Amino acid sequence: MDLPKHLQAEFDIKIHKVLGSQLLDLRQEAQNGSIILENLNLASGVYFINITSDQLKQKLVQKLIVK
């Protein structure tokens, strides 16, 4: 699922706001093979997320857009 360009910016901006409380949940999903989560920079708390499950991606995108 590709995001429209105007939503991709929103996604990129908001994704790290969700990671604080949900990082462990995302790691669990990563272990299940639904996403690939890499910590790119521990100091800045910036994470790269590659979501391989379209269903999970849709749920996360909806959650981010609502906030």
Image (cartoon, helix red, strand yellow):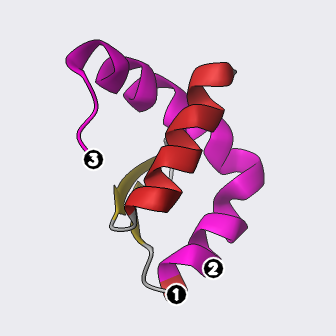
Distance (Cα) linking label 2 and label 1: 5 Å
Mark 2: amino acid: Gln
Q: Mark 3 — residue? A: 1
| Residue ID at (42%, 84%) | 33
Q: Main secondary structure of the magenta part?
A: helix
Q: Quadrant of residue 54?
A: bottom left
The one nearer the camera, 12 or 55, is 55
Q: Mark 2 — residue? A: 28
Indicate whether residue 58 is drawn in magenta. no
Would you say residue 45 is visible in this rendering?
no
Q: Quadrant of residue 9?
A: top left
Would you say residue 67 is visible in this rendering?
yes
Of pointers 3 and 2, the one earlier in the residue sequence: 3
Q: Secondary structure at mark 2?
A: helix
What is the x, y in percent for residue 11? 43, 29
Q: Quadrant of the C terminus?
A: top right
What is the x, y in percent for residue 22? 72, 55
Position of residue 6 relative to residue 12, above or below, is: above
What is the x, y in percent for residue 37? 42, 67
Query: Looking at the rendered structure, which numbered label has been put on residue 9?
Result: none
Instruction: Using a 10 Å C-alpha cutoff, classify the residue at mark 2 as few (fewer than 14 neighbours), some (14 to 19) or many (20 or more).
Output: some
Mark 1: amino acid: Gln
Q: Mark 1 — residue? A: 31
Residues rendered magenta in the picture: 1-30
Position of residue 30 relative to residue 53, above or below, is: below
